Amino acid sequence: MSEEVIQYFAYGANRDSRMMKAITGSKELVGRQGTLKGYTLCVQKLNQIPDSVSETSPAPISPRALLKESWPDTFESYIIKPDPNGEVVGTIWKPTSLQRELVRDWELVDFGWYKDINTSAVTADGQVIQVQTEGLREGQEIDREVDGHNYETWLSKPGDFERVAEKARREYIERISQTQKEGPSKTPLKEA
């Protein structure tokens, strides 16, 4: 039985192959340009990122506190929010299930920052395909909206993003390995 094909729509730094390699550890991911309709690209500042521990969090730490371990107070991140007139250009990747989980972990979905979104995107040749992505949770604030067609890929130095993503990938693999050894009832928690 073959594994389900995942189509992941990436925006911001995740639309760049260097970033996806740092997050997933794979140089083999192939992507193509796509446009997400019905969403606007926004920027969140560090002080707008949730500072409470989510019930789904794999560790007793808030997304903001976790980010503060690796980033300065000037940290900013792209995030999308629903907007019937919005469009965001990005890359549609085909990650494996594990690679998709690594991206979800990088985006701190289970930690309570981004939320999973299942929607559709349009490829450069006009195909409409179902994609997974992540974006703004209800109740979160943004700093500003940006042009979803013409935006800088990186909000910080690419090397900083890659370094932090590689560290996050190692920690995720270690956490999953530990969980599998101990069983689901003894999920280890990352120390803050």
Image (cartoon, rainbow, N blue to C red):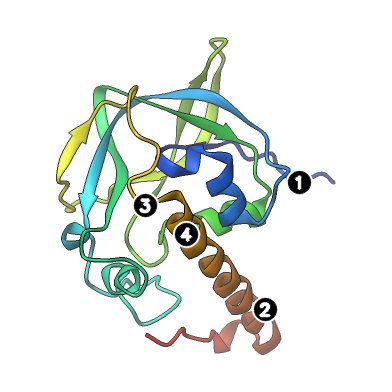
Q: CA distance from mark 2 to mark 4?
A: 17 Å
Residue drawn at (76%, 46%) of the image: 3
Element type at mark 4 = helix
Q: CA distance from mark 1 to mark 4?
A: 22 Å
Residue type at mark 3?
Lys
Considering depth in this image, is 69 or 113 the residue closer to the camera? 69
Indicate which label's residue lies in the foreground, 2 or 4: 4
For marks 2 and 4 on the same chain, the one whose residue lies earlier in the sequence: 4
Mark 3 Cα shell of 10 Å, populated few (<14), some (14-19), many (≥20): some
Mark 4 Cα shell of 10 Å, populated few (<14), some (14-19), many (≥20): many
Residue type at mark 2?
Ser
Q: Which residue is mark 3?
A: 115
Residue type at mark 1?
Glu
The answer to whether the residue labelled 2 contacts the one labelled 1, judged by CB atoms less than 8 Å apart, is no
Element type at mark 1 = loop
Q: CA distance from mark 2 to mark 1?
A: 21 Å
Residue drawn at (31%, 27%) of the image: 148
Query: In the displayed structure, would residue 116 be above or below residue 72?
Result: above
Considering depth in this image, is 30 or 162 the residue closer to the camera? 162
**From this viewpoint, is residue 105 visible?**
no
The answer to whether the residue labelled 4 contacts the one labelled 3, judged by CB atoms less than 8 Å apart, is no
Indicate which label's residue lies in the foreground, 3 or 2: 2
For marks 3 and 2 on the same chain, the one whose residue lies earlier in the sequence: 3
Q: Which residue is mark 2?
A: 177
Q: Which mark is residue 153?
A: none
Q: Which mark is residue 106?
A: 4
Element type at mark 2 = helix
